[in-house]
Image: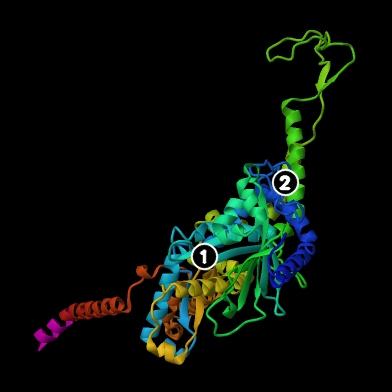
Amino acid sequence: MNQQPKELRDLADQMLRDFEGLEGNRTDFETQWREIAERILPAYSRFFESRGWDPTPGEKRTEFMFDSTGAIGLGRFASVVDSMLTPANRKWAKLIPSSPDLAKDRGVREYFEQVSNVLHHHRYSPQANFQSQNFESWRMLGAFGTGSVYVDKAEGRAGLRYKALHVGELYLRENHQGVVDTFFRRFRWTARQIQQRWPKFVENSKELSAALKNPSQANTRWEIVHCVKPRTDLMPGRKDYRGMPWASYYVLRKTREIMDQGGYRTWPLPTSRYYTVPNEVYGRSPAMDVLPALKTLNEQKKTILKQGHRMVDPILLLHDDGILDGASMVPGTGISGAVSKDGRPLIHTLPIGNPMAGKDMMDDERAVINDAFLVTLFQIMTENPQMTATEVIERTKEKGILLNPTVGRQQSEYLSPLIEREIDVLAAQRLLPEPPPVLLEAEGEYELEYDSPMAKAARAEEAAGAMRSVEQAIQIVSATGDPAPLDNYNWDVMIPESSEIMGMPLRWMRSPAEIEQLRKQRAEQQQQQQMIDAAPALASMSKGG
């Protein structure tokens, strides 16, 4: 019997009604997600059950998977996006002042650089688990079109903790501007797990207390619904959860009780969507686009397997005269009566057609799938390692054009909220450096500048345009013998910026001081050489005088 006050009972009922409404409105998405999972992520295929959802641990789920092209392509898609957008070996985003005046202050720039370093340090701390969970989110993006990572303070220590949440347990809602601002998460815990997280609630719950005392219910899992949404009763200035813009509720679904309520200062679930269709909240994915190819390839593989079986162990065509009655089919055994007296075979194999035609058809489907998962897009350099620098720049520009929509969406919808959440959690733990007084006085804000390889590829048009322009100028110089056209280029600006766009490490470039010293030495050497070249003429003039 629910013993909570009526206010909390009504709140729990409202939460569950909202959740059940979202639960019943995505049946078509779940059908597609299940079909995709069965063919490229079979371990997730049981997570799309709106009713009776309870996958069995260790259950075999590969009965629909005959070809691994989609699974391999999905893994490569996640690896490509991770290495191109969030590579662990570099700071792929940095904070910069949003005000041009503040950007001129060295102390402000150094402060934002320190904050960027602190973010990178805590994000990639082994205990934070960002790399694995971010990779899992990219996999969900490629397979189901929606990837989400929950960001919060680490339990029992300072720092951050990340958890990728599967779209099968998430139910999303957008605001009027198309931004995801509400999520419901459905998950199941045992009574013991619930007691570890909410001991006081379990103490006051007859059902959970009884389950803890009953050994037969030790593995029984209880469904919990977590809801985070904009707070409608916000009280600005309050220090507790009522002063936080995002409200949080945990509801035990069976007893319809509020287990816990709290809040967040920033959105805790950065959510990435590959692309969206009008009037749809959930994203659509590359796997959705090529679902027909995935299904076709699996059916083709089944046919080829049957054909290969018939080739290895062929079906025999026999005349009905009992030739093989009692004959042994063991290798090396002779069969009497299998040929006529003139040597004509009386046993034939069933024709199986041309296996190569099936292979060609499968290769066509594989090419479509690999294109969707960006596999072929990133084979350019390995297929033609002898490309010139200009060709490399042009190919990089092409990749940037194709990837620019993906880059923009992931930066604005996923990475920006992710970094905002990280800053908030670390600031609450006093792990960020103190801002300089000039920044506090100006109430300055920050902007994000992305420095990932994918962002650089999107900027490759600048480098490609520069190379084309220089090549044209060199042709004019060669034709006219006049070097003046090259005077239009500021090499000291163009070359460092082009190198930065192409990803050359800064440590490989000479510093301005080193360049100045090198040019000074070169000028002195030229002057000495001129004096040496002029010495015979001066000596001759001296003798003549």
Q: Nearer the viewer, mark 1 or mark 2?
A: 1
Pick whichever, 100 or 161, lies toward us: 161
485 on left or right of 137:
left
Report the quarter where the N terminus lies: bottom right
Based on the picture, tell me whether residue 71 belongs to the magenta stretch.
no
In the rendered view, would you say 529 is above or below 139? below
Q: Which quadrant would residue 65 be assigned to in this image? A: top right
Q: Which quadrant would residue 180 be assigned to in this image? A: bottom right
Q: Amino acid at mark 1?
A: Thr
Q: Which mark is residue 402?
A: none
Decide which of tag 1 and tag 2 comes sooner along the chain. 1
Q: Which mark is residue 362?
A: 2
In the rendered view, would you say 300 is above or below 501? above
Based on the picture, tell me whether residue 543 belongs to the magenta stretch.
yes
Residue range in magenta is 536-545
Q: Which mark is residue 86?
A: 1
501 on left or right of 378:
left
Percent position of residue 372, x then y: 67, 59
Pick whichever, 432 or 210, lies toward us: 210
Badge 2: how crowded within 10 Å, few (<14), some, or many (20+)?
many
Q: CA distance from mark 1 to mark 2?
A: 33 Å
Residue at image x 68%, y 41%?
60
Q: Is residue 498 visible to us here?
A: no
Report the quarter where the C terminus lies: bottom left
Q: Secondary structure at mark 2?
A: helix
Q: Amino acid at mark 2?
A: Met
Badge 1: how crowded within 10 Å, few (<14), some, or many (20+)?
many
507 on left or right of 138:
left
Q: Which quadrant would residue 230 be assigned to in this image? A: bottom right
